[in-house]
Image: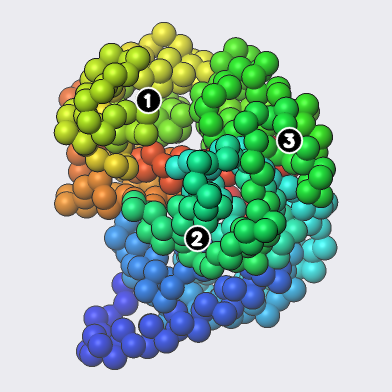
Amino acid sequence: MTEQNRPVPADFFADWKEREALAEAMIPLIGKLYRENNVSLYMYGRNMVNRSVIELMKAHRFVRQIEHNELSEFETFPLIKALAEMDLGPAHIDIGKLTVKYQESGNGEDMTAFLQREVGDDIGCMRKPLPQPQDIVLYGFGRIGRLLARLLLEKTGSGDLLRLRAIVVRKGKSADDLAKRASLLRRDSVHGAFDGTIRVLEDKNILVCNGNPIQVIYANSPEEVDYTEYGISNAIVVDNTGVWRDEDGLGQHLKCPGAGKVILTAPGKGDIPNIVYGINQGEITPDSKIISAASCTTNAIVPVLKALMDDYGIERGHVETVHSYTNDQNLIDNYHKGSRRGRSAPLNMVITETGAAKAVAKALPELGGKLTGNAIRVPTPNVSMAILNLQLGRETTKEELNEYMRKVALYSPLQQQIDYTISSEAVSTDFVGSRHACIFDSEATIVSGDSVVLYCWYDNEFGYSCQVVRCLEKLAGLSWAMYPKS
């Protein structure tokens, strides 16, 4: 792309205040497009809906860091304002890429004419992403369940897309069980405070979150639940428990009145499709009843492996996962059925196994038998790393490989899955809250001929939950017009 360099401002503070005012003026326009038209704006893949002034400004700065383009609020605001005045149908619009395309169109083209050409198909469009709102039920409300709740509530939009209707949990021993569930949703030691308000209706077992009434259903097994009693029908049940991972076990959900489909937030067994969104979501069809969103590690490594396989080929390799400890480990030394996992998680690095390397073959059959894998649990609560030691099909250089991965992260269909960092100071906590399946660390890349060692960070909680939601949208049949068109 063409580099766009703004003159260095004579007064940095005055320039900041002007850009700050423009970012502030964007917020109601972005909100209007989202609530009234189901139009979501992005900045090179980064969501701009429900973002603060500073977050919007940082999104603009991100473009400069990896695109060498001084894209600023001065350039994007006029396009956002013009889009807000159009009668747009539901769509995802990358305003960053659209602005750069306008800059590069040259010849001083009229902005209205440019937008008419670029998003004209969407103007006056009456189609709906879904024929009717899709009911969602979370079965289990642990780490992943609560993050999925946050994401679903954030994506409520106009209210006619995915609707979180219920949460199913076992009744706790505490008399104030519902209040405790609400508190865990409201406050999170890793991911911070819930972005909104929560009201607890004790007498009805309902949590009202950002205006969404969510029924809390107490049950010990799926067979105890009748969703139709709560006005829920044809629901997609998201099983976060991991208790059942095969078709027989997960099929229990489908026997519940009001349930229609099931998605598992763990690797599925048997013939259950293991979906890594961005790679094999095409396996999800209107007839799909039960799918798995695979594991966080599988979601992190498969997109990178796919990108490398497409351009370089992969002969063989080893995946070493440096993974944050999880809730199945012990705080202090105690009995555990797994080897080594009984030792204190906050005090030890623990060698353990991972099925992620073998699971790759379910999404990328071409790599079947070519990868080995292992894992080390480390004393951090979130954000993990996958180290890919690969022999490629041809020789390359660090510069060539990094540039290829940068373009994949910015322009390819894997943009939602692969992020890219150029920081030589990046550490794990920098990626808490990342919405990508992984973040490619370009500074850590090692290349020697056809042998490479690549480092990929991933938020094994939030980033994975974002992948689950993408699978959920696909399972619901949700589709969007995307602009600018590829």
The picture quadrant where one finds residue 293 is top right
- Give 288 or 71, whichever is nearer the viewer: 288
| Mark 2, secondary structure of its residue | strand
Q: Is residue 279 visible?
A: no
Residue 306 lies left or right of residue 245; in this view the side is left
Amino acid tagged 3: Val
Amino acid tagged 2: Asn
Alpha-carbon distance for marks 3 and 1?
50 Å
The picture quadrant where one finds residue 350 is top left
x and y, in percent, of residue 34 in the image? 63, 68
User: At 69% across and 56% down in the image, what residue appears?
Assistant: 204
User: At 75% across and 58% down in the image, what residue appears?
Assistant: 160
User: At 79% across and 56% down in the image, what residue appears?
Assistant: 128
The circle on residue 225 is 3
The circle on residue 38 is none
Classify 12 as above or below 219.
below
The circle on residue 312 is 1
Alpha-carbon distance for marks 2 and 1?
31 Å
Q: Characterize the local packing of mark 2: few (<14), some (14-19) or many (20 or more) Cα atoms within 10 angstroms.
A: some
